[in-house]
Amino acid sequence: MDRTTDAWGSGLLGVIIFSGSLPATRIAVGDFSPLFLTSARAVIAALLGAAFLAVLRQAKPQRGDLGSLLVVALGVVVGFPLLTALALQHITAARSIVFIGLLPLATAIFGVLRGGERPKPVFWLFSGFGAATVASFALFNSDAGSLTGDLLMVAAIVLCGLGYAEGAALSRRLGGWQVISWALLLSLPMMAVIAVQTMPQVWSVIGGPAWIGLAYVSIFSMLIGFVFWYRGLALGGIAGVGQLQLLQPFFGLALAGLLLQEPVAWTMIAATGLVVLCVAGAKRFA
């Protein structure tokens, strides 16, 4: 497998895994508080990451890497999970797709600022059009939102884009799963304290779907997805491979159609076709 195929294949697998994050979060916050969900998922993923680091005897990051790891932790371990969990108490998971459509553009911008990448000017046309396509589709098909929920999602997208770009740049030296594992370990003491302080007072009222949602966001969204995602970004470029996130909302809707028997509108198929063309164009000019 050549480097380009490996990069885009890894990135695509990461996006598929991430596509279930917001629906799982939406289900979990029905029984768990946003603070507990955010901290518990981080603690569970950190313990798994620590086990991998110990078993595989990975070297500790250098002192100069700590700042970048803290940025990753702020963006993808704490910031995005907490802000989206808070936002999903005010808006629907469908409406959140409006903002997920802006994540590739945010990642590309931070890839330029933090990763030193310089995509060609035409790249920005494809990236901007793809983001507009996803946002328009999601806005047309979503319920009315709230200002609070929308602002929380905007903040989440900014922090997530920063965390993606910073982690991808660091992954070129440390490796993808190592970066997210070390970032999780850095945040573990604080997250463990928050988890203990915010845990449910009565566990018997927590339903099965909420436990499944917590398990998914802890194991897949917080750890396994990043193994493939950071690898793809590091190998293929932050700005270019990051455009695969444009497909994330449509993967989520497709999964809903297959698993939940929800209808798939023709507008979804048309919008997906436009997005695929945008991703192909961004790949060409990244």
Image: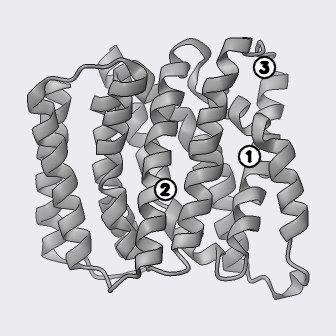
Pointer 1: residues within 10 angstroms few (<14), some, or many (20+)?
many
Q: In the rendered image, is residue 110 in sight? A: yes
Marks 2 and 3, the one that precedes in the sequence: 3
Colouring of the image = one colour
Residue type, label 1: Ala
Residue at 79% across, 82% down: 206
Tag 1 residue: 45
Pointer 3: residues within 10 angstroms few (<14), some, or many (20+)?
few
Residue at 31% across, 35% down: 108
For discs 3 and 1, the disc positioned in front in the rendered view: 1
Residue type, label 2: Ala
Q: Quadrant of residue 183?
A: top right
Residue at 68% across, 54% down: 218
For discs 2 and 3, the disc positioned in front in the rendered view: 2
Residue at 67% across, 13% down: 64
Tag 3 residue: 56
